Image: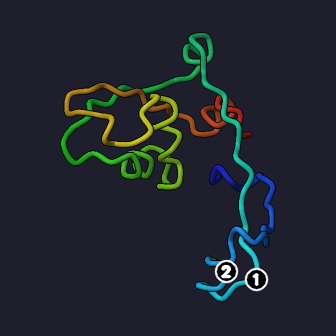
């Protein structure tokens, strides 16, 4: 489940976006409500099964998400859980934790 699946949408047709709407020949811009994610505390982390992964050159969140969850759309779960929003925040040799069960991870993060 992508993180925006259950979020509200807003059709924005304010003058602020005139340049964009004219450029794209559209009448409004659709925006998604920002989801509020829960930052797991130590108790939540102990209840979630994870596996360690040693970051190596060429690793990408989306590849790990595909490997562990069967879908690249869950890359952000690994990033959020580890507090590393992009691969640029990691160096070869860093150890990250990958939540094993995606449903439990999404519940812990407050998405479902």
Secondary element type, mark 1: loop
Mark earlier in primary sequence (1, 2): 2
- Contact, CB < 8 Å: mark 1 with mark 2? yes
Q: Residue furthest bottom?
A: 25
Residue at 56 percent across and 11 percent down: it is 42
Q: Nearer the viewer, residue 67 or 11?
A: 11
Q: Is residue 79 left or right of residue 110?
A: left
Residue at 58 percent across and 39 percent down: it is 102
What color scheme is it? rainbow
Q: What residue is shown with label 2? A: 21
Residue at 41 percent across and 27 percent down: it is 97
Q: Nearer the viewer, residue 85 or 64?
A: 85
- Establish if 22 lies above or below 17: below
CA separation in Å, label 1 and label 2: 6 Å
Q: Nearer the viewer, residue 39 or 51?
A: 39
Q: Nearer the viewer, residue 34 or 79?
A: 34
Q: What residue is shown with label 1? A: 27
Q: Position of residue 57 (x, y in %)?
A: 18, 43
- Establish if 76 lies above or below 66: above
Q: Residues within 10 Å of mark 1 (few under 14, many from 20)?
A: some
Q: Position of residue 108 (x, y in %)?
A: 66, 28
Q: Residue furthest top?
A: 43
Q: Position of residue 58 (x, y in %)?
A: 22, 48
Q: Residues within 10 Å of mark 2 (few under 14, many from 20)?
A: some
Q: Position of residue 86 (x, y in %)?
A: 39, 42
Quarter-wise, where is residue 40 in the image? top right
Quadrant housing the C terminus: top right
Secondary element type, mark 2: helix
Q: Is residue 35 left or right of residue 41?
A: right
């Amino acid at each position: 489940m992508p993180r925006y699946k259950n979020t509200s949408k807003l059709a924005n047709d304010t003058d602020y976006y005139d340049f964009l709407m004219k450029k794209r020949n559209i009448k409004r811009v659709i925006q998604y409500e920002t989801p509020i994610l829960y930052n797991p505390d130590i108790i939540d982390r102990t209840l979630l099964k994870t596996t360690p992964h040693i970051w190596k050159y060429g690793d990408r969140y989306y590849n790990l998400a595909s490997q562990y969850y069967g879908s690249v759309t869950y890359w952000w779960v690994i990033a959020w859980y580890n507090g590393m929003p992009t691969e640029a925040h990691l160096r070869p040799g860093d150890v990250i934790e990958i939540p094993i069960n995606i449903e439990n991870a999404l519940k812990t993060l407050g998405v479902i």
